[in-house]
Image (cartoon, rainbow, N blue to C red):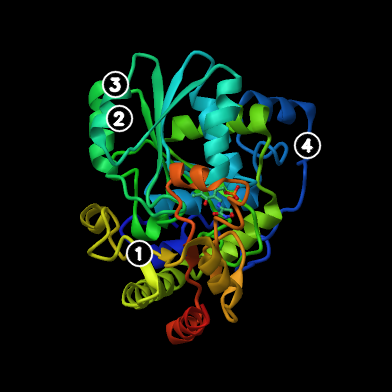
Amino acid sequence: MENKNMGIGTRAIHAGIIKDKQYGSLTMPVYQSSTFYFKSCEEGGRRFSGQEDGYIYTRLGNPTTNTLERKVASLEGAEAAAATSSGMGAISSALWTIASAGKHIIADSTLYGCTFALLSHGLPKYGVEVTFVNTSNLDEIKANLKENTVAVYLETPANPNLKIADISAIAQLVHGYNKDIKVVCDNTFATPYLQKPLQLGADVVVHSATKYLNGHGDVIAGFVVGKADFITEVKMSGIKDMTGCVMSPHDAFLVLRGLKTFELRMKRHCENGMAIAKFLEAHPKVEKVYYPGLEGHKGYEIAKKQMTAGFGGMVSFEIKGGKENGMKFVNALELCTIAVSLGDAETLVEHPASMTHSTYTAEDLKEAGIPEGLVRLSAGLENAEDIIADLSQALDRI
Ligand code: LCS
């Protein structure tokens, strides 16, 4: 079933599904098989040479995984998608397909930590040059575009400070300079429920499907999404030969199941995110709230333009009194869970200065733009009043 005019809730359930003719199974079965038999050497030959469609080996394709890829491509309004075993698998497979020694990438300086590590250490080790800029400032991108630039990489909203970049303005600028440069956008925080970067002019979308797309905290998974030719290249080079980071059929099944409630979950995440952000904004013990749906947020106008159905479930905020009070607050939470990751049914909270960035000195934190009292919260699916009651009692105990 493929009808681009249907709503995202309908497509999250039906898109990509080919009805099971053998047994009439409602859900896509898990084809938990590493390999697929051929009737003859001749048939095997035709499959390997591409003369005949059909499965060969699960690293090259699998019916359960391919169903999920068609569904995610439909959600992003894209020609094709490649499923990977993690978000980092998606990002590294995409960037290794695009870049090679001697090429140049422009990346935003606010990125998920492991993406930052890939761009600052991993790729340069093999001769790829990377320049970090603030992609919210178009002049910084313009000043760094060069003849060998092959990609501009960004997250919006960005992890962890929810900085917003203007996807369509960036795509126009970059493609005006050279139409072959790929604008790559990590859409993990917004998801296609809120934002479709390809329709805004980006060339490639990457996802950590570990988060909202699966939504149940029981899978590590990722996607690369874009034009069919590029996705074929990612599958045949970036995934098949370079990273090998193929998604398992069982994980594909879990993400297919998670996506059935995608629209319902995203609506609730957004409602809870907004209610929490408003509560925190009015609280005297909170210095600052970073939520793109608040009018005071630097990127509010752009977020309103490009995030069409809400502002997401991620809220970062700064507790007055620095690291000590940040830790006191997080340790006092009873309903909210102290954990990294995001986009799950449970509200998850992390304090970068004492947890993910605990090796940073006070100076390092300042340079990375992470205040010592910063707390990152992923609004879950609980009732907003219960989450807020927990935040309130923990703030009272500081
Ligand atoms: N992109 C973003 C924006 C992320 O937040 C993450 C993981 C990744 C990519 C990588 O995806 P993975 O390989 O884990 O599926 N973010 C995490 C976080 O903020 N806490 O724990 C993981």
Count the marks: how many? 4
CA separation in Å, label 3 and label 1: 39 Å
Query: In the structure shown, which secondary structural element does the residue marked by tag 4 occupy?
Result: loop
Closer to the chain start, of discs 4 and 2, is 4
Which mark lies nearer to you, 2 or 3?
2
Calculate the distance from the C-alpha at mark 3 to the C-alpha at mark 4: 48 Å
Which residue carries the number 1 mark? 288
Query: In the figure, residue 194 lies in which quadrant?
Result: bottom left
Residue hosting label 3: 178
Q: Mark 4 Cα within 10 Å, few/some/many (few <14, many 20+)?
A: few
Mark 3 vs mark 1: give the one in front.
Answer: 1
- The tag on residue 141 is 2
Is label 1 in a helix, a strand or a loop?
strand
Q: Which mark is nearer the camera, 4 or 1?
A: 1
Depth check: give the residue in front, 78 or 318: 318
* Mark 2 or mark 3, earlier in chain: 2
Q: Looking at the image, is mark 3 or mark 4 earlier in the sequence?
A: 4
Residue 304: x percent and y percent?
23, 59
Q: Residue at x 61, y 21 (%)?
A: 125
Camera-side mark, 3 or 4: 3
